[in-house]
Amino acid sequence: MKRHTHGNITVEACRLVRLAESDLVTVDCCDCGTFNLHFGPMTMRVRPEQLKAILFTLGRALAAADVPSEHVAAVHSGASGSRGQA
């Protein structure tokens, strides 16, 4: 981890590696073991088990909403251009 000093406070900053990105979201992995999900100006830091639970829950939501399979395939392939469509 890198150290940064702000006044009298020393902060350790994580090193991030970009794993995936699309028009809507980017996913980084941190050397501390968390994943950073960036949605525009918002960032969520989650542990691996939380990310798995989020993905599982979103998959169930897509199935429950009966989302057409071509939309789900586009999400899995990282295709852009489907943003804003239901």
Image (tube, rainbow, N blue to C red):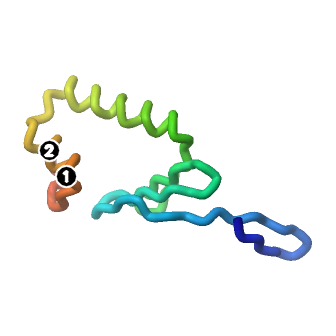
Q: Residue at x 15, y 49 (%)?
A: 74
Please report the residue visible at 87 percent of the width from the left and 76 percent of the height from the top: 7
Q: Are marks 2 and 1 in contact (CB under 8 Å)?
A: yes
Horizontal and vertical percent position of residue 50: 51, 35
- Residue at image position (23%, 32%) is 62
The total of numbered circles placed on residues is 2
Residue holding disc 2: 73
39 vs 56, nearest the viewer = 56
User: Which quarter of the image is occupied by the N terminus?
Assistant: bottom right
- The answer for how far apart the CA atoms under marks 2 and 1 are is 6 Å
Q: Relative to 2, is 43 above or below? A: above
- Quadrant the C terminus occupies: top left
Q: Is residue 83 left or right of residue 22?
A: left
Name the residue beneath numbered marker 1: 77
Please tell me whether mark 1 sits on a helix, a strand or a loop. helix
The spot of residue 31 in percent (x, y) is: 61, 57
Kind of residue at badge 1: Ser
- Residue 75, compared with residue 53, is above or below; it is below
